[in-house]
Amino acid sequence: MSPSPPEQHKAFASEKGPVSLALVTVSDSRQPDTDDNRFYMETQVSQAGHQLVGYHLIKDEPDQVIKVLDLLAVGEAQIIIFNGGTGISRRDTTYDALSSKLEKTLPGFGELFRKLSYEEIGSAAMMSRATAGVYRNKIIISTPGSPAALRLAWEKLIEPELTHLAWEVVR
């Protein structure tokens, strides 16, 4: 039996070499030395054989989100992961800022994330506005800021498709 098209794409993409990622933590309370998501992602990206080529810690302010998005969109990162600011409180503005810039959306990411999150935390998962899409030929992914949410997104959705996403957006 021959491999399915997604399996063929993944195999081809994996031959392209390591993927470069940037991480943006959006938080009003974290500091670089207390950002557990940063430490987790540094380890995970390295263990997966990829490269973390950028890290920013910003406040949940729309102008800061847009500024770092535009900065990273002209850099070497193929995939930019934002974590934080995806909820529904007044201070949660990351989703709004990013969604206004996405040229293409990947609705399946948010749908799958909320499904998986529901299995772990129940109905509170409906308050997540996790999203993903494409901006200037970069994959943009936005997850909640809790360490458990970022781990879930990385392990179940992002890492398994990482090379495929990076390849697909520029082919």
Image: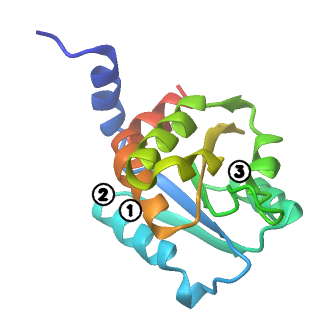
Tally the numbered discs: 3
Disc 1 vs disc 2: Cβ atoms closer than 8 Å? yes
The amino acid type, in three-letter code, at marker 1 is Val
Find disc 3 in the rendering and name its residue.
73
Figure check: 6 above or below 91? above
Query: For the residue carrying disc 3, how many other residues have a C-alpha within 10 Å: few (<14), some (14-19), or many (20+)?
Result: many
Figure check: 42 above or below 118? below
Find disc 2 in the rendering and name its residue.
48
Callout 3 secondary element: helix
Please provide percent x and percent y for residue 167: 46, 34
Find disc 1 in the rendering and name its residue.
45
Which residue does the image show at 31% across and 58% down from the upper left?
49
Q: Earlier in the sequence, mark 2 or mark 3?
A: 2
The picture quadrant where one finds residue 23 is bottom right
**Is there any visible trace of residue 138 in the rendered image?**
no
Callout 2 secondary element: loop
Which residue does the image show at 79% across and 54% down from the upper left?
70
Q: CA distance from mark 2 to mark 3?
A: 23 Å
Q: Nearer the viewer, mark 3 or mark 1?
A: 1
Please provide percent x and percent y for residue 161: 39, 39
Q: Quadrant of the N terminus?
A: top left
